[in-house]
Amino acid sequence: MRMLLAAAPVTALPPHRIGWESYAGGDDTVSFDDIAVATARVGC
């Protein structure tokens, strides 16, 4: 993942896509429950 820092405040975020491909058998479920957008690095 690459982080880009803007010189001016960001007023809109570009679309983000997360992809999934299944090569065998049944369906799977993927969930993302913590996504953060901040002006500084977010600690874990």
Image (spheres, rainbow, N blue to C red):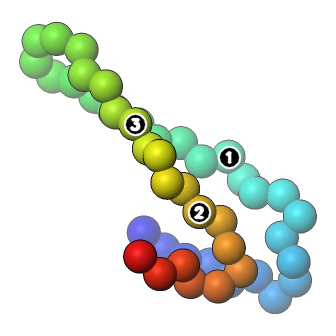
Q: Which callout, 1 or 2, points to the residue nearer the camera? A: 2
Residue in the image at 71% along x and 80% along y? 39
Of helix, strand and loop, which one carries label 1? loop
Q: Dot 2, how many residues are within 10 Å of its Cα: few (below 14), some (14-19), or many (20+)? A: few
Q: Can you give x and y, in whole percent of width and height, for residue 11 in the image?
A: 89, 64
| The N terminus - image quarter | bottom left
Residue that label 3 marks: 31
Contact between labelled residues 3 and 2, with CB atoms less than 8 Å apart: no
Please state which amino acid type lies under the numbered disc 1. Answer: Pro
Of residues 43 and 23, which is closer to you in this image? 43
Of helix, strand and loop, which one carries label 2? loop
Q: Is residue 14 left or right of residue 36?
A: right
Residue that label 1 marks: 15
Q: Dividing the picture into quarters, in which one does residue 5 lie?
A: bottom right
Q: Can you give x and y, in whole percent of width and height, for residue 36 in the image?
A: 59, 63
Please state which amino acid type lies under the numbered disc 3. Answer: Ser
Q: Is residue 7 left or right of residue 15?
A: right
Q: Can you give x and y, in whole percent of width and height, for residue 25 in the image?
A: 11, 12
Q: Is residue 14 left or right of residue 31?
A: right
